[in-house]
Image (cartoon, helix red, strand yellow):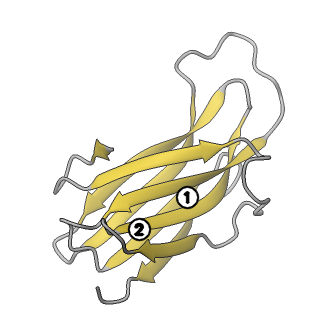
Amino acid sequence: MNTGDDHAVPYCVLTRDPSGWGRRPPREAPTFARSRGESEYLSVTSRIRYGSSTCDRIALETVELTAENELRVVVGATSKASAGPTCTDDIDDREYELVVGLDEVPIEAVRLTERPFDGPANTWTKTLPDR
């Protein structure tokens, strides 16, 4: 797992080919799920339009924990560093899952902002149930 810069928030981001998960329309509200087992974690699943399938990608812009224990996450579209001089003109979207470890981080709410390639930002806030 990566570790966020502020407050050591452990997280990882997974993306799948469009056929890998169910087809969720872009801009639909994300799914927030809290799981308990040997470790406790939060899973946030959503889909975002990110631009050209050959030159652009999904990027995690911000993961920070506020003093009020709100996890603020910004996911956006960005250009690939290895993009060549010619890009396809398709506008692609991809489903992603953000997994955040909760064992050592007291998260009470999540604010997710998505900044798609082709439209305004969308923000959702979810209060987590008590542990």
Q: Which residue occupies the foreground of this view, 10 or 86?
A: 10
Separation (CA) of disc 2 from disc 1: 18 Å
116 versus 73 height, above or below = above
Classify residue 36 as left or right of residue 107: right
Q: Mark 2 highlights which residue?
A: 42
Give the amino acid at mark 1. Answer: Glu
Q: At x 71% / y 49%, what residue is drawn?
A: 118
**Callout in the foreground (2, 1):** 2
Whole-percent x and y of residue 79?
A: 58, 29
Label 1: few (<14), some or many (≥20) within 10 Å? many
In which quadrant is the C terminus drawn?
A: bottom left
In which quadrant is the N terminus drawn?
A: top left
Classify residue 101 as left or right of residue 92: left
Q: At x 67% / y 24%, what residue is drawn?
A: 55
110 versus 45 height, above or below = below
Give the amino acid at mark 2. Answer: Leu
Whole-percent x and y of residue 87?
A: 75, 20
Classify residue 77 as left or right of residue 91: left
* Circle 2 SS class: strand
Q: Say whether residue 95 is visible.
A: yes
N-terminal label among 2 and 1: 2
Classify residue 102 as left or right of residue 24: left
Q: Mark 1 highlights which residue?
A: 114
* Circle 1 SS class: strand
Q: At x 51% / y 73%, what residue is drawn?
A: 32
Q: Say whether residue 121 is visible.
A: no
Q: At x 81% / y 24%, what residue is drawn?
A: 88
